[in-house]
Image: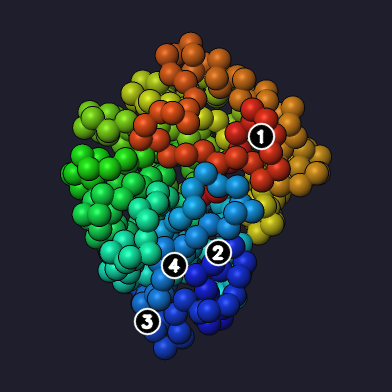
Amino acid sequence: MRWENLSPDSEHSRADAALFGADAVTTRTFDTPEFRGITFHEIRARSVVNRVPGASRMPFEWTVNPYRGCTHACVYCFARKTHSYLDLDTGLGFDSQIVVKVNAPELLRHRLASRSWRGEHIAMGTNVDCYQRAEGRYRLMPGIIEALRDHANPFSILTKGTLILRDLPLLRQAADVTDVGISVSVGFTDEELWRTVEPGTPAPERRLDVVRAFTDAGIGCGVLMAPVIPFLGDRPEQLRATVRAVAASGATSVTPLVLHLRPGAREWFMSWLARHHPHLVARYERLYAEGAYAPRWYQRRITRQVHDLAREYGIGPARADTPRRTPVPAPEEPEVGLPTQLTLL
């Protein structure tokens, strides 16, 4: 396991200046039902605020990711590739070998207090979910939010986890002093699809309960309809059901993002597809023949359908001038007017 290769920028394929040494790793397992079969690698990191490379075209420059690997086990998760930098398996290993940066809150507080820090926006949930099940045991996010609150530093969180409700009082305090963006990811409300492609996540309806709770607390919460999965979650009646449920939750916006399949995620997703929907393999190979992104015509069609439904139900896409939203990144290969899947899930 190449712990020495995990550098501050290794989530973006760099391997210099190790983030922690191998002697700083403690491996644990817990014999409880919710963590059975999961191994936690606790590390004392040397850095937790990561700069996003300019080439990524993200609308934010800094991220904090207290975990690597994710028990949500979404079969399409783009972040699977990052496990390969540690010689960890990008399939089941990504779902069950979780790296925990146990000193993340204190590192963040130190960075925010440094003279060089200029109060830039920090995005969370952009690699793996910071409110996955591990957070229930390690409780890293309260300390992270407290540090951001105390320094009035703007931040955003994108999550599928209902555990964020535990931190709602802290988030309300932070929202009183700085710009806080909260978004929940709900790509579909189809229960059968959810159970097979997002087996470790809370049900879509429970995630929409999170939106309701934040709305009731006076904190606007958007929904990233991500990902819209071709041929499995893109039928007109499925799109309508999802947008209708999002509107009923009180979401301030809904932004559709079509599935993309980067190396690492692509292989795992396609192997899953071959097992569960073998008749779709050839269609996917054609649809994604040009690379990680679905064709422009397909993205346009989904975006148009969802935006039409959103207007019908009285909500709209996220806008750059709307406060307290998690920003939606531009595609790596810019396509005017087309959103793309957020690099989190």
The amino acid on which the numbered mark 2 sits, given as a three-letter code, is Glu
Q: Judge by depth and name the residue closer to the eye, 99 or 150.
A: 150
Q: CA distance from mark 2 to mark 4?
A: 15 Å
Q: Is residue 336 left or right of residue 206?
A: right
| Element under disc 3 | strand
Residue corresponding to mark 1 = 230
Q: CA distance from mark 2 to mark 3?
A: 21 Å
Q: Residues within 10 Å of mark 4 (few under 14, many from 20)?
A: many
Depth-wise, is mark 1 or mark 2 nearer the camera?
2
Going from N to C along the chain, the mark reached first, 4 or 3, is 3
Going from N to C along the chain, the mark reached first, 3 or 1, is 3
Residue 53: x and y in percent read: 58, 58
Residue corresponding to mark 3 = 26
Residue corresponding to mark 2 = 11
Indicate how the structure is coloured in the image: rainbow
Q: CA distance from mark 3 to mark 1?
A: 41 Å
Q: CA distance from mark 1 to mark 4?
A: 29 Å
Are discs 2 and 3 less than 8 Å apart at CB?
Answer: no
Going from N to C along the chain, the mark reached first, 2 or 3, is 2
Residue corresponding to mark 4 = 98
Q: Can the viewer see residue 150 in this picture?
A: yes
Depth-wise, is mark 3 or mark 1 nearer the camera?
3
Q: Judge by depth and name the residue closer to the eye, 32 or 148.
A: 148
Residue 48: x and y in percent read: 40, 66
